[in-house]
Image (tube, rainbow, N blue to C red):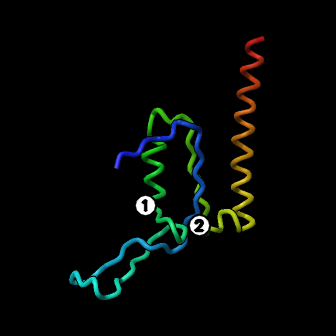
Amino acid sequence: MNFRAPAVPTTCINGVGVPTTEKLVYWDGDFSQAPEILYGDGDGVVNSASILALDTVIGEDPRQGYYKSVKIAGTSHDGVVSDGAALERLVSEIARENFVQASKEEDSRVAQL
């Protein structure tokens, strides 16, 4: 697959520290039996390997510009927007970036005077 960075300011906010399916093992290639489920780190839905792939594909692309990855420990996929502390962090990240962007725009307007 050939993914490219979206080339717009991007902040990814994900939970981590929750057991998340990492692999399904079908012993002896017997797909008629239920697989063994191996767990790894993630948010209960998205595995950390996928989260880290975004950091590589988007965050390391020189065309991307602004990219920030925020990982909230002990937070599930749904918990990012339903857990009080996680939601507070999410809103804080959005507010912080909006403030930074507004400050840059103001500085640009002042410089033009």
Residue depth check, mark 2 versus mark 1: number of the one nearer the observer: 2
Tag count: 2
For residue 68, side relative to residue 98 (left or right): left
SS of the residue under disc 2: loop
Q: Residue furthest bottom?
A: 33
- Residue 86 x, y percent position in the rendering: 69, 62
Within-10-Å neighbours for mark 2: few <14, some 14–19, many 20+ = some
For residue 28, side relative to residue 107 (left or right): left
Task: State which tag comes first along the sequence, 2 or 1.
Answer: 1
Residue in front for this viewpoint, 45 or 17: 45
| Real-space CA distance between mark 2 and mark 1, rounded to the nearest whole angstrom | 15 Å
33 lies above or below 65: below
Mark number, residue 91:
none
SS of the residue under disc 1: helix
Identify the image quadrant of residue 99.
top right
71 lies above or below 38: above
Q: What residue is rendered at 69% in x and 41% in y?
A: 97
For residue 4, side relative to residue 83 (left or right): left
- Residue 57 x, y percent position in the rendering: 43, 46
Report the residue marked by disc 1.
49
Q: Amino acid at mark 1?
A: Ala
Within-10-Å neighbours for mark 1: few <14, some 14–19, many 20+ = few
Q: Residue furthest front?
A: 32
Report the residue marked by disc 2.
77
Q: What residue is rendered at 55% in x and 65% in y?
A: 16
For residue 39, side relative to residue 44 (left or right): left
Q: What residue is rendered at 34% in x and 50% in y?
A: 1
- Residue 75 x, y percent position in the rendering: 62, 68
Q: Amino acid at mark 2?
A: His
